[in-house]
Amino acid sequence: MKRILTSSALSLALLLGAAAPAAIAGVRKESPAHKAAVKKCNSDYNAAMKEAKMKKGKERTAAIAAAKATRKQCIADAPK
């Protein structure tokens, strides 16, 4: 019985110790400006991908790569 209580107490302490940093960090909220910028980036990306998929061959591959790169840069430039 003592072994069960000791092991359960130890595991509970380890669990709380591991969960504490995550609880302290909290949830990061994005600003409304960031959300709007990301929404615009995504809509531009979707439009570019729709346009790229109408092309053939190397043009299509290049257009898809350009759309992905543009989206990545757009999200990086979005206000935090």
Image (cartoon, helix red, strand yellow):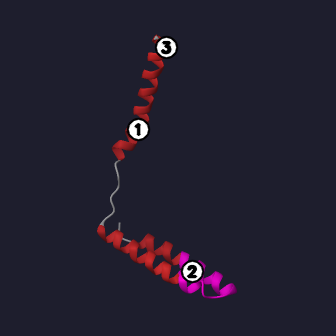
Looking at the image, is mark 1 or mark 3 nearer the viewer? Answer: 3
Seen in the picture, residue 11 relative to 45 is either above or below; the reply is: above
Type of residue at label 1?
Answer: Ala
Q: Which residue is mark 1?
A: 19
* Label 3, label 2: how far apart the Cα atoms are: 62 Å
Residue behind mark 2: 66
Q: Amino acid at mark 2?
A: Ala
2 lies left or right of 37:
right
The magenta segment? 49-68
Of pointers 1 and 3, the one earlier in the residue sequence: 3
The residue under label 3 is: 3
Q: Residue at x 59, y 79 (%)?
A: 64
Q: Quadrant of residue 15?
A: top left
Picture coordinates of residue 60, whole percent (x, y): 64, 84
Q: Quadrant of residue 54?
A: bottom right
Look at discs 3 and 2 and give the one toward the viewer.
3
Q: Are marks 3 and 2 in contact (CB under 8 Å)?
A: no
C-alpha distance separating marks 2 and 1: 41 Å
Q: Amino acid at mark 3?
A: Arg
Q: Residue furthest left?
A: 32
